[in-house]
């Protein structure tokens, strides 16, 4: 257990340091802008490119893994979306944010750093595949359901074009696509360029985690929504369990791929859920509360998951 604590302590410690520094210095949230720009446009893309480019191309085309992953994610999304509509009498737009709060994990800022720390470089490919395909779905489904819920004035073709543009121009997806191309062609970056990529990639995890802590500090908990009672267990427990079982039903995968997918499913709600809520003026304060609560509780749930994995108590195949 000491090894597991030693693994997660630096990781969550960076989030805690960001939180503490933000509370002490009282900088406005706008001061975080350039750090977020560096993370989103430079550091994390460099990390994704570096890891994917070194991967054999046959590992990058595991459609069975991708389908199992997104099926588990959107099974939980659908369940919470329906619960919002039927149990809480939420609007379609409110239920959409609630569903995302349960299914959209922090796979961008937290995922790569923690997965690589826990499982090493073999975790790079499943992280990249999960990130790309889940985000393509999130970027598509959120605006589509918001449009169905009313309030969207633009024509359908413009909405579809906007969704497609967000997908193909996202820095993470561009970097991963470039990594795919490099892996396919056997491209190797010249030594000076490779050193720059390595240098930037090393900055990705600490900067992302620090920025996440700052964001949590600057969006304090103002109200605890009733929906947290089922959204939090769905995000931290139901989604990783569903992911584990779905991968077991889908076929035989490398244990590192299974554990990486389950770990990413167990991560707290992504800060992007608040951004989407703010963009559409729906459920934003309660989304912020969900992010904070799931992040705090994930210290215990992620530690427990890693203990089960590292101790051998959680077999890679639930249906041997």
Image (cartoon, grey):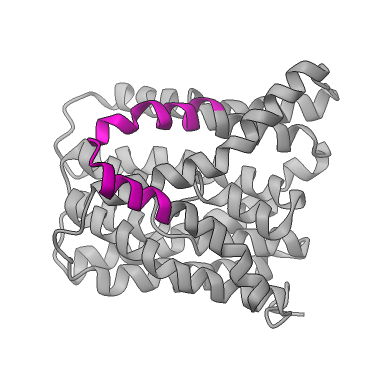
**Residue at point 60%, 47% (across, down):** 112
Is residue 283 something that shows in the picture?
A: no
Q: Is residue 248 above or below residue 112?
A: below
**Residue at point 42%, 60% (across, down):** 268
Asked if residue 177 lies left or right of residue 44, the reply is right
* The N terminus lies in quadrant: bottom right
Q: Residue furthest bottom?
A: 313
Q: Position of residue 148 (x, y in %)?
A: 23, 42
Q: Is residue 167 above or below residue 295?
A: above
State the image quarter where residue 201 is shown: top right
Asked if residue 139 lies left or right of residue 185, the reply is left
What span is in magenta?
Answer: 16-42
State the image quarter where residue 269 is shown: bottom left
Q: Residue furthest front?
A: 24
* The C terminus lies in quadrant: bottom right
Q: Position of residue 75 (x, y in %)?
A: 45, 63
């Amino acid at each position: 257990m000491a090894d597991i604590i030693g693994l997660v302590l630096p990781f969550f410690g960076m989030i805690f340091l960001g939180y503490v520094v933000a509370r002490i210095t009282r900088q406005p949230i706008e001061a975080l802008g350039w750090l977020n720009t560096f993370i989103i446009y430079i550091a994390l893309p460099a990390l994704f490119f570096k890891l994917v480019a070194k991967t054999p191309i046959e590992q990058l085309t595991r459609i069975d893994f991708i389908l199992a992953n997104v099926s588990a994610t959107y099974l939980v999304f659908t369940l919470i979306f329906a619960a919002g509509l039927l149990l809480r009498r939420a609007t379609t737009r409110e239920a959409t944010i609630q569903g995302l709060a349960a299914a959209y994990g922090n796979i961008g800022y937290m995922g790569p750093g923690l997965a690589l720390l826990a499982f090493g470089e073999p975790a790079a490919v499943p992280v990249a595949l999960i990130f790309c395909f889940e985000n393509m779905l999130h970027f598509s489904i959120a605006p589509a359901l918001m449009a169905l819920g009313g309030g969207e004035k633009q024509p359908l073709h413009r909405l579809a074009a906007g969704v497609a543009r967000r997908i193909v121009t996202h820095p993470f997806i561009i970097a991963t696509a470039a990594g795919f191309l490099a892996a396919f062609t056997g491209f190797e970056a010249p030594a000076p360029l490779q050193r720059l990529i390595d240098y930037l990639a090393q900055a990705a995890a600490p900067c992302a985690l620090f920025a996440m802590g700052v964001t949590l500090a600057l969006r304090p908990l103002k109200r605890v929504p009733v929906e947290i009672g089922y959204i939090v267990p769905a995000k931290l427990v139901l989604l990783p369990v569903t992911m584990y079982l779905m991968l077991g039903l889908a076929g035989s995968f490398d244990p590192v791929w299974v554990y990486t997918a389950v770990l990413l499913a167990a991560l707290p709600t992504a800060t992007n859920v608040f951004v989407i809520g703010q963009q559409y003026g729906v459920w934003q304060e309660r989304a912020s509360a969900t992010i904070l609560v799931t992040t705090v509780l994930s210290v215990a749930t992620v530690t427990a998951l890693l203990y089960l994995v590292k101790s051998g108590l959680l077999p890679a195949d639930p249906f041997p």
